[in-house]
Image: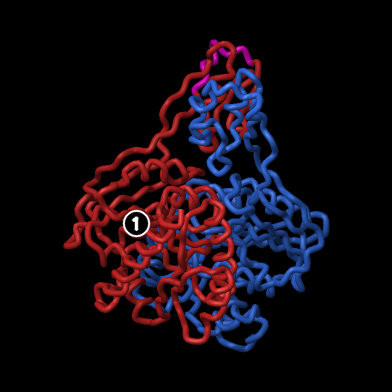
């Protein structure tokens, strides 16, 4: 089973939910797909042993000798990753999407492709007493597109385990890439107008991609949750868990300590959350 | 005209709340909400929308099933897995590169402009505001970000404003880089947590990569003063000025819930004074 934890707004508690859930279950694979700013490692403490798998993307190389300066590649490129400077074609690798179109349209075969590293996958297949299989995607600094790193990360999903994916914030390509092949999505929000606004956007995206989902209210406060609860009731969305706004939880987070380690009763709650997710997935499968 | 972008790396550190407060303190400026993935500034500044238009930042492949001979060339050449096994197109995966249309031997595929989102030109009680709403799941958020920033600069130019305040998005990728293009200063808002520091390190590396002037604000510093010290230590090593430490205040959240702005509602509070003097320092640094 494959569960993605996401949110429209950043800083709502995706990593808190992902890591604490992972630490409460058996036979788990945790993947940090927030490849621009991966933070799960802080709470899981893997040993990457200075090893990594490079994530490469193909970028064009123009043989200026063969190139006739016809501009076909420059005109074809939808991303303006190629430009004509004097008589030479220049390549801007950071904005290249690696579609291969320039090579196809070149009438004199002056374009070939080479690999360029835009990110890394790090892993530790057996962390701690829970034997978590941990994977982390990392986009190289200065790169623009994180989606290929997330795609590469997902190739290592282990079907024999419960996979939890910690997604990047937002509602665009990277977040969707981290979510599209999941069985269930957990939308983490907070009871503020910002939280609600961004939750509404996430719900819209989840319905568009057709993945069953539930909501977790983080920093939940007596009397303040109505905002989110009313929306969820109107939209017929399950609120699967509430994590209270408590100084202790915030402090543990800031020191990089998963709160299930200190507040033991939460391990049971995360186990129940997992069972509820299984129930929702089964229900979804039966209704299809 | 000066341009300043507020970023954070990590989400939820207080970029938007601070930007809105700066906007209440600034004079003669334009505001741009460049967090098009999750725009929230409008909830605090309540803009009155004057102009709204669709923005298309890219293309999408459209297949004519009648013409298609099921030759499979598009399926073979598409590198985004956007052509399904029955040769229909998956719009969520399509990145609009046009390769399928190029290779199709019977012209069964053409490219259409894809709607990226809506762009708004608005007026708030403090200043004109440019913002956007990305269509759910749209491609090319970077282009929409650039459009918002360009439009804000254009507006400032036209109306003789001397400052543009840009609220950026979390992360260090495409939308963030687009929001920083050509600005005079990046203001990095961080928080005292291990995650905050980890994310700050990556932001600073990105900033150094693009050689931008930047300064740091530690928000909610008193939630973990030891971590705040560590962050300051890291900043010192990188020759980065920490301009201010702002304490955690439940008042921020309470006012946010009411859609109100702290420096206006609680003018005489210590925290409002901290933010006001911080803003003066920012203006001095900019000039």
- State the hue of chain A: red
Q: Position of B43 compared to A25: left or right? A: right
Does A67 appear in magenta?
yes
SS of the residue under disc 1: strand
Chain designation of label 1: A
Color theme of the render: by chain
Position of B26 relative to A82 (above/below): below
Does B194 appear in magenta?
no
Does residue B178 appear in this view? yes
- Between B23 and B84, which is closer to the camera in this rendering? B84
In the image, the segment drawn in magenta is: A61-69
Magenta stretch, overall SS: loop
Residue B267, horizontal then vertical, whole percent: 65, 86
In percent of the image, x 68 and y 70: which residue is there? B23
**Which residue was labeled with disc 1?**
A164
> Which chain, by letter, is blue?
B
Locate residue A27: give its quadrant: bottom left
Q: Position of B69 compared to A128: left or right? A: right
């Amino acid at each position: 089973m494959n569960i993605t934890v996401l949110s429209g707004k950043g800083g709502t508690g995706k990593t808190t939910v992902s890591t604490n859930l992972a630490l409460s279950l058996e036979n788990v694979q945790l993947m940090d797909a927030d490849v621009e700013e991966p933070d799960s490692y802080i709470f899981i403490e893997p040993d990457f042993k200075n090893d990594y798998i490079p994530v490469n993307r193909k970028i064009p190389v123009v043989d200026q000798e063969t190139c006739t300066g016809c501009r076909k590649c420059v005109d074809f490129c939808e991303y303006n990753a190629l430009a004509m400077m004097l008589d030479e074609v220049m390549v801007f690798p950071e904005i290249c999407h690696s579609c291969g179109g320039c090579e196809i349209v070149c009438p004199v075969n002056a374009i070939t492709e080479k690999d360029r590293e835009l990110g890394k996958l790090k892993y530790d297949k057996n962390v701690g007493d829970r034997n978590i299989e941990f994977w982390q995607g990392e986009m190289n600094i200065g790169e623009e597109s994180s989606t290929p790193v997330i795609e590469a990360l997902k190739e290592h999903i282990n079907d024999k385990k419960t996979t939890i994916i910690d997604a990047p914030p937002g509602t665009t390509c990277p977040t969707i890439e981290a979510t599209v092949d999941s069985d269930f999505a957990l939308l983490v929000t907070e009871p503020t107008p910002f939280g609600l606004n961004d939750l509404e956007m996430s719900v819209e995206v989840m319905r568009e991609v057709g993945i069953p989902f539930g909501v977790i209210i983080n920093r939940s406060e007596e009397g303040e949750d109505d905002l989110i609860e009313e929306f969820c009731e109107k939209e017929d969305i399950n609120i699967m868990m509430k994590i209270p706004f408590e100084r202790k939880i915030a402090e543990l987070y800031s020191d990089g300590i998963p709160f299930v380690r200190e507040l033991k009763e939460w391990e049971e709650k995360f186990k129940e959350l997992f069972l509820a997710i299984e129930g929702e997935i089964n229900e979804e499968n039966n209704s299809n | 005209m000066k341009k300043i972008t507020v970023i954070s790396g990590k989400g939820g550190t207080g970029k938007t709340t601070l930007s809105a407060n700066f906007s209440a303190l600034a004079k003669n400026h334009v505001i741009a909400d460049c967090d098009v993935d999750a725009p929230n500034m409008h909830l605090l500044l309540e803009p009155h929308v004057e102009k709204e238009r669709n923005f298309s930042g890219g293309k999408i492949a459209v297949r004519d099933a009648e013409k298609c001979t099921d030759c499979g060339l598009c399926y073979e050449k598409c590198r985004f897995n956007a052509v399904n096994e029955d040769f229909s197109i998956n719009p969520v995966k399509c990145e609009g590169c046009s390769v399928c249309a190029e290779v199709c031997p019977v012209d069964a595929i053409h490219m259409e402009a894809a709607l990226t989102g809506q762009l708004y030109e608005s007026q708030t009680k403090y200043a004109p505001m440019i913002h956007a709403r990305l269509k759910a799941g749209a491609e090319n958020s970077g282009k929409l970000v650039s459009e918002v920033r360009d439009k804000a600069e254009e507006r400032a130019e036209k109306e003789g404003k001397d400052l543009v305040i840009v609220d950026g998005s979390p992360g260090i990728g495409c939308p963030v880089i687009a929001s920083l293009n050509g600005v005079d200063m990046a203001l990095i808002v961080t928080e005292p947590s291990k995650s905050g520091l980890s994310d700050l390190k990556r932001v600073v590396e990105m900033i150094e990569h693009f050689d931008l002037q930047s300064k740091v604000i530690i928000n909610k510093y008193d939630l973990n003063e030891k971590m705040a010290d560590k962050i300051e230590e890291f900043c010192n090593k990188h020759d980065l000025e920490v301009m201010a430490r702002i304490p955690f205040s439940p008042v921020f959240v309470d006012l946010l819930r009411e859609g109100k702005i702290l420096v206006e509602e609680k003018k005489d509070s210590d925290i409002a004074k901290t933010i006001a003097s911080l803003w003066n320092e920012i203006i001095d640094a900019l000039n």
